[in-house]
Amino acid sequence: MLEECKTAQERWGGVSNIIDRWLQERRTMLVQYTGLANRKDLDGRIPAHSQSVLEFCQILVDYISTGHFEVYEQLVKEGDEFKDTEGLEVAEELYKVIDATTEQILDFNDKYQTPDDLKTIATDLSQLGEQLSTRFEAEDCMINVLHTSHGTIAS
């Protein structure tokens, strides 16, 4: 039994590290988002402003990609390993919410890949903030359902 617990910890402890790194990336992205959202004078003709927008878009896409191609996959794998049918069903519904935000977030990224026209960025950032809030809530719930709930088993 002790060996089984040790094996589970070795197997799923790595998921915690992935999630921790990803949540740190979220924090970094939010700091950049807040910095942009609080600026009232963004001008695409000013190289530093354009660079800030481009850097934000890059970390935004990195965050989204890590979620889709690394974190969610590991969470579902963990749910499968623990035969957590109920958790996987909840996660499937949460993924639909997350997926619905992806297109709009990527549209923002596409629009500002050449940030020479920032006239509507304040409105776009506000709408993006709403999408991110919805997404974070669903992601946090997915982590809770498919990882945190198995913590006592994996420890």
Image (tube, rainbow, N blue to C red):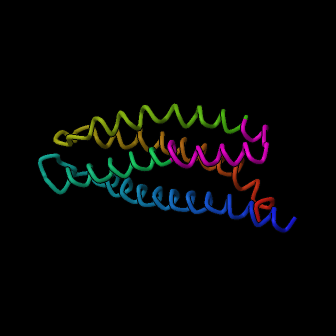
Q: Quadrant of the N terminus?
A: bottom right
| Whether residue 133 is situated above or below residue 12 in the rendered picture | above
Determine the residue positioned at 80% across, 59% down: 153
| Magenta segment includes 72 | yes
Which stretch did the figure color magenta?
A: 67-88
Which residue is farthest right? Answer: 1
Q: Residue 117: which quarter of the image?
A: top left
Q: Residue 38: which quarter of the image?
A: bottom left
Determine the residue positioned at 47% across, 48% down: 66
Determine the residue positioned at 41% across, 55% down: 29
* 79 vs 96, nearest the viewer: 79
Our reading of the magenta stretch's main secondary structure is: helix
133 sits left or right of 108 in the view: right
Determine the residue positioned at 69% across, 48% down: 78
111 sits left or right of 103 in the view: left
Q: Pinpoint residue 51: horizontal percent, then vertical percent.
A: 21, 53
| Magenta segment includes 134 | no
79 sits left or right of 36 in the view: right
Which residue is farthest front? Answer: 3
| Whether residue 155 is situated above or below residue 70 in the rendered picture | below
Q: Quadrant of the C terminus?
A: bottom right
Number of labels in the image equals: 0
75 sits left or right of 101 in the view: right
Q: Pinpoint residue 149: horizontal percent, then vertical percent.
A: 76, 53
* 27 vs 122, nearest the viewer: 27
Q: Pinpoint residue 75: horizontal percent, then vertical percent.
A: 64, 47
* 154 vs 93, nearest the viewer: 154
Q: Residue 16: which quarter of the image?
A: bottom right
* 63 vs 124, nearest the viewer: 63
